[in-house]
Amino acid sequence: MVKRFRIVTACLLLAMAAPFAHAKEVTLLNVSYDPTRELYEEYNAAFAKYWKSKTGDDVTIKQSHGGSGKQARTVIDGLPADVITLALAGDIDAVATNGKLLPVNWQSRLPHNSSPYTSTIVFLVRKGNPKNIRDWGDLVKPGISIITPNPKTSGGARWNYLAAWAWALQQPGGSEATAKEYVRRLFKNVPVLDTGARGATTTFVQRGIGDVLLAWENEAFLSIKELGADKVQIVVPSLSILAEPPVAVVDKVVLRRGTREVATAYLNHLYSPEAQEIIAKNFYRPIDEQVTARHAGQFPKIKLVTIADFGGWAKAQKTHFADGGVFDQIYAPAE
Amino acid sequence: MRIAAAISATLLLAAGAARADDVSELRERLEAQEQKIRVLERKLELQDEATKAAVPNTPVVRASPQQGFRIQSADGANVVRLRGVLQFDGRYFPDDVTPETADTWILRRVRPILEGTLNGIYDFRFTPDFAGGRAIVQDAYIAARLKPWAVVTAGKFKVPVGLERLQSATDLRFIERALPTSLVPNRDLGLQFGGDIAGGLVNYSVGYFNGVSDGGSSDGNAPTPDAENDTKGDWAARVFLQPFLNSDNFALRGLGFGVAGTFVDSTGSATTTLLPSYRTPGQQTFFSYRATTAASGTTPAVNGTFADGERLRWTPQAYYSIGSFSALGEYVNVSQDVTRATPTAGLRSATLDHNAWQLQLAWFATGEDESFRGFTPGSVFSLENHTWGALELVARYHELDIDDDTFVGGTDSFANPDSAASKASAWGVGVNWYLSQNYRWSENYDVTSFAGGAPGGADRPDEKAVFTRFALQF
């Protein structure tokens, strides 16, 4: 009698627990910058598998891609991003300060200033480099057509611009005035401005426009992989900039949607060895030392300046890219 | 010979080199032109992408006869509409009793309407009215549509009681509402919970309001307009059924019926009586309770009748439409406790039951479908196209019967039978010509007969009213 009672009780308890044992289904929205499509396609699949094995829950990550600045404005305007993985810290700062969607100290919440990978800016030219482009100075020669996205919308374009500015400053007699004149001449050679880095790659690679593409390093490698080494080649300039694309959880959204735990895990997992391998495989520079060592030969050595050399993103944004800034002063659309 | 050959060879080489230079230059120019074309094509492509990307965020601006002028967010969740109602009436009384001063043109309704929805579920409406040389707030409310059956409305709006009162002023079939509407509240300030159940087969409302007298609006409250004028608020409730709304039975689909009512227990005073007057279809007062007047010369002071206790209103109501024909009917009963400090009988109190009813018929001679709310004319008036709009013929009969106890007691009565009629019976006919969805001309003829209301117990002479209306709405 007692045994039967215990069996029945156990069955009842199991039946009551059954609904709670059912796997949860969660979706996340990752709002990212333009060229990270392939990276996150592969990473999302890996994270979903990892999360399922860890918690038993199913997670689906939806992606949104576009120019980094444009994406930041879209999130501020209400796009419910659980995480943002943008091209530069200044864009996430805008989401924090203007959108008030995450705290202003967001960058200290994850390792390496919330940048699980880095990249830099290189030149992508036609195979054989018919216009003999070797360094930044060659870009302003007459007859050279440069493809770069719009710094007002694209994070990659802002890295391009700052790299060019840094090179001009370091030339003999370099000053703010000569650097400004240099970037004015550079953008005079730009026939069309895409809104994002991927669009600029399309313009150069698929549409066959321009002699040189100022590209994210990962975009340049991806273009060679997809188009073929017989069509385009990379030219490494004498100086470039360390681009540190950061990532962050959007606190107000995850609080409303109840997704903080999985969103935080999603970003934390980017620092795992598995994710760092995916990062390197997609031509981003990993930050894990062991993975970096394994892929050392993949990435060229370049002299790099950093955003700190410009006084940080807040200063750089205000000086160069805000309305009325240096870019607005020097750029006039080609007629 | 050799020299000539050498010279020829040199000339040929030079010519060849020149041609090669020309070809090379042409090739370069061609490549430059191709680049320009590609650049232009890419710019167009980027423009298209930008336009497509902007469409989901681009607000919509629309103007339509049905919904006025509208600005709406791309996702439709937020919309603001600007509408309006302008009604210009002419009144003429071809009878011997109505003063000639009542023959007049008037602006009956001058209402800009600002309404809309925010976040997909919060509706609002603000309607001022500037007719009659004054500015009042007709409607000012917010409604949260939490669920179809759970709509919370707060502000100033129509109390959910009278059927013809609930019909919009732009959908009325007669220029002025019938006698039963004189017994039900118009607009009041309050909080209401209601909604549709079973896909609209049942509509219900329950609300608590400041309270207004029969036929009144809270902007007419004394001493303070749009404020509580007594110690208690009115409870109001209504349920209306359209059981065949989604039925295959076409004949019964347009049938709706229900019941509504209000209740309050409150006390007025000789100066703030909380009691109404009633008006004819021609808008002339035919019944009032005795009012408080001060002594004047040899005329002693008179203490007026005031509300003292319960007021219960209830009204069964129904509407039916089929094709071009419709019928509207309602019965209203008001049971009102009153008191008066009489000259000879001391303090008198009584419960007075007044009731009214109407039957209204409408028919579109031009074949359009009748409905309680809105309609679409089959054509608009156009001399060029020989189209004439929609023509509607209307008829009604209605009565308002005052409780006989109101007049009992001579000078101690609650109303003076020499000036207040005990019954008004009216019939009316009319025609509505809808020149378009938005513009209408109407003509009504109403004849109202009375029992009592004249000195010596005589019957007040019939009122004959010819009303004309030019109405614009959007």
Image (cartoon, coloured by chain):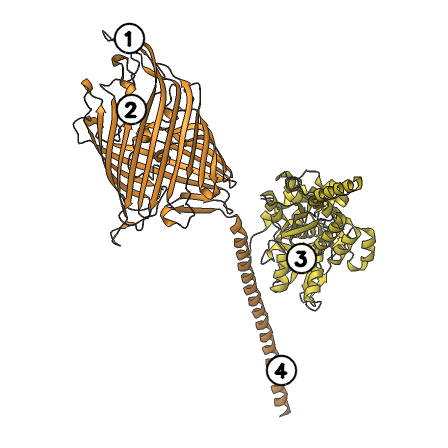
Give the Cα distance between marks 1 and 4: 141 Å
Instruction: Indicate which label's residue lies in the foreground, 3 or 4.
Output: 3
| Image spot of residue B244 (x, y percent) | 41, 45
What residue is disc 2 on?
A: B402
Q: Is residue B12 above or below residue B354?
A: below
| Res B20 → quadrant | bottom right
| Image spot of residue B216 (x, y percent) | 35, 26
Label 2: chain letter: B
Q: Amino acid at mark 4?
A: Leu
Q: Nearer the viewer, residue B360 or A149?
A: B360
Residue neighbourhood size for the residue with mark 4, other residues' Cα within 10 Å, grouped as few (<14), some (14–19), many (≥20): few
What residue is disc 1 on?
A: B344
What residue is disc 3 on?
A: A214
| Chain letter of the orange region | B
What residue is disc 4 on?
A: B13
Residue extending furthest toward the front: A1
Residue extending furthest toward the top: B298
